[in-house]
Amino acid sequence: MKYTSDTFPELTTLTNPKLTLLVRVVFLLFTTFLLVLLYLIPLALINDYTGSTEIYILIGIYALILTYGIYKFSKDYKKKSTNAIHKIVVNKLGIQYHKLNGEIEHLSYKDLNKSKQLYTKDIFTKTIGVNISSKTLLKVFYNQQERTISFQNTDIFYTYLSTNSRELRQHFLQGVTLYRPDLKIADSVYNDFFINPNTFEFDKKGYKKTMIIALIISLVILAIVFLSINA
């Protein structure tokens, strides 16, 4: 929905506890399987070195180091989790990131900077990774530095998954156009996130079209690979 600077409302993170629980369970099952595998792999060596005292000592040392590593990682992870973001608010001032330790990090529209790079807009996107692992990030210049803007809670175990990250992003961009009209938003921002630049709503038609094209291309590639194998 298109708003004015006077009617621009506040939008807050919406979460899904059930989905979060499902993701946690799947992740824990996978992690448990991986850890069991790491502990069992050295035991396979026993068959080749039956009766060797040295191999049992090495396996014991390996198990101790692995256990300490897991303990150290868990301890550090829990300590860092206090900075996890559990709520995101977008309003007339900008974005507020509410952390588990009670702190609130403010990202104000007024502190956004213009790009000093000739071919880079003030707000743009950057893609990291390749193929399936690729991820598109929303970038701004904040306090004279390039910064990634996130709209998802940051810890799967201490916070809940956000279900309206897309709406928060759209709301923020509309806020930029209302309170910082001097900033230029790259066309790639609207295209990459399927946002209608006139209404700031999700472009379902464009999204479906892109997904269909991607599916067709994938099927064509699979068909070519299949035919080449059986040729």
Image (tube, rainbow, N blue to C red):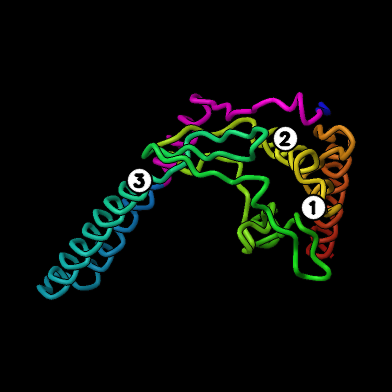
**Quadrant of the snapshot with the N terminus:** top right
The answer to whether residue 28 is left or right of residue 87 is: left
Give the mark, 1 or 3, whose residue is nearer the N terminus. 3
Q: Which of marks 2 and 1 is in front?
A: 1
Amino acid beneath label 2: His
Which residue lies under the disc numbered 3?
32
**82 vs 4: above or below:** below
Q: Label 3: few (<14), some or many (≥20) within 10 Å?
A: few
Q: Nearer the viewer, residue 45 or 77?
A: 77
**Bounds of the magenta segment:** 4-30
Q: In which quarter of the image is the C terminus?
A: bottom right
For marks 2 and 3 on the same chain, the one whose residue lies earlier in the sequence: 3
> Which comes before the other along the chain, label 2 or label 1?
2
For mark 2, what is the residue?
171
Which quarter of the picture shows residue 196? top right
Task: Categorize mark 2 by other alpha carbons within 10 Å: few (<14), some (14-19), many (20+).
Answer: many
Percent from the top left, x then y, of residue 21?
45, 29
* Residue occupying image coordinates x 82% and y 35%: 200
Q: CA gap, disc 1 to disc 3?
A: 48 Å
Judge left or right: residue 103 versus residue 1. left
Residue 75: mark in rendering: none
Q: How crowded is mark 1: few (under 14 residues within 10 Å), some or many (20 or more)?
A: some
In the picture provided, is 203 more to the left or to the right than 103? Answer: right
Judge by depth and name the residue closer to the eye, 34 or 2. Answer: 2
SS type, badge 2? helix
Q: What residue type is labelled 3?
A: Thr
Circle 3 SS class: helix
Q: How far apart are marks 2 and 3 (CA)?
A: 39 Å
* Image location of residue 191, percent across then percent down: 84, 48
Residue at which label 1 appears: 183
Residue 226 lies in the magenta-colored region: no
